[in-house]
Image (cartoon, rainbow, N blue to C red):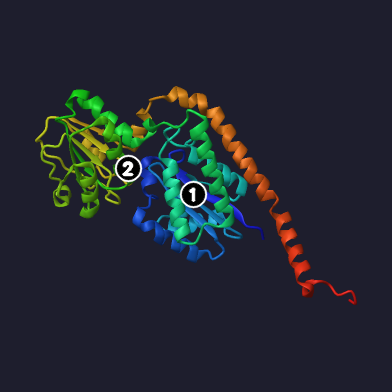
Amino acid sequence: MTKALRFISISHLTATLILREEFSIPEEEKPEVIARLKNAFPDITGLLLLGTCNRTEIYFEAETTSSEDLLDTFCAILGRESKRNAHLFFQSNDTLQSVQQLAAVSAGLRSKVLGDAEIIGQIKKAYILSRKAGLQGSLLERALQTVFRSHKRVRNETNFRDGTTSSAYRTLKLIETSYGSTSKQSTKILIIGAGDIVKKLFKYNQKFKYQHLYISNRTEKNAALLAKQYNCQIYDWGKVMSNDFEDFDVIIGAASNCHHLIKELDNSKDRRLLIDLGLPGTIDPVLGDKAGIEFFDLDTISSEIASNKEKRFQAITEVKEIIQAEVDEFTKWFLEAPLRALLKTANIEIKDPSLKISSDS
């Protein structure tokens, strides 16, 4: 049986934030999930586990294992019932449809924020995990090369990419809108977590220039590295655990696998801005109902990003044309695979006389 590239996907297009949280996988647990899927299905030769703020997707290369099979096992690994949740997933067993999906996702065409600039970095990170597990596969490898070529062309040939589509950028913009551009010397900000999105917050802050930044993380050495690099202060993790936030004006939750870690606030401030970038959510949204508190989660942040929308919309046609051209190249390669295999076999027969049919037979 011929191998096929297949996928399953749960995203903002199929599920609410609360439902997506149930299928999010912390970075440190991804290698184990990949290993368990590989052990469950020995015919899988390629597998890419993509987890972002708005989606969890698995692309895999196999002969007999179907997307339905993989979804059942994936749900079982996470302790979820597949029959109850199957409707939340978009899936396919068709190679060309899977490549189209991966290419569109990587370009940001299917992101909650059109043209999401962060998604390609997340795909590259997922690819590194695949290679470490020895699961890049020939079809998956070729599909990813198609994605990387598409990304390069979209970046160089269109106006579709823009850093302002980043959730990290929008977070800092929200703070500026809420407290004013003149308050950057006084606004006291606590960032909880030390993952990719936190690193982007610090990167973009080089433009915004907020002065009173604090970072707290469960693994203090990770916080210390960022604190040293960006000249900010460390806030004790124990205080975060006990919900002791002193006089912070802004609290940004982006800790991995810390569901509703923040659930209480004192009354030391008349107003506070809470921004939850975690999946699952780091901040209990109930806090948003308290007087003087503004609360934003990933969905509300994404829906409010509007900068340079017109340029991105104008570029959509160009982006789709680029993606289609690259996918067409993949399709040509894929459809010619049987011929390449036949030629390879013929070449072996010529080199090895023992494989030829005897003239006496």
Viewport quadrant of the C terminus? bottom right
Question: Does any portion of residue 15 appear in the rendered image?
Answer: no
Identify the residue at image location x=71%, y=59%: 341
Nearer the observer, 56 or 171: 171
Estimate the spatial distance between the alpha carbons at disc 2 and disc 1, rounded to whole Å: 29 Å
In-image side of 106 versus 93 (left or right): left
The image position of residue 46, as x and y in percent, is 53, 57
The mark nearer the N terminus, 2 or 1, is 1
Quadrant of the drawing holding the N terminus: bottom right
Q: Name the outermost residue toward the right.
A: 360
Q: Which mark is residue 259?
A: none
Residue picked out by circle 1:
86
Tell me the crowding category of disc 1: few under 14, some 14 to 19, or many 20 or more residues within 10 angstroms, Cα based.
Answer: some
As drawn, 278 above or below 72: above
The residue at 84%/72% (across/down) is 357
* Along the line of sight, the residue nearer the viewer: 5 or 208: 208
For label 2, the residue is 197
Query: Which numbered disc, 2 or 1, marks the residue closer to the eye?
Result: 2
| Label 1 residue SS | helix
Q: Position of residue 133 (x, y in %)?
A: 46, 61
- The amino acid at mark 2 is Ile
Q: Is residue 247 left or right of residue 311?
A: left
Q: Secondary structure at mark 2?
A: helix
Whether residue 122 is situated above or below residue 183 in the rendered picture: below
Residue 154 position, x and y percent, is: 51, 34
Q: Nearer the viewer, residue 222 or 173?
A: 222
**Which kind of residue does numbered mark 1 sit on?**
Ala
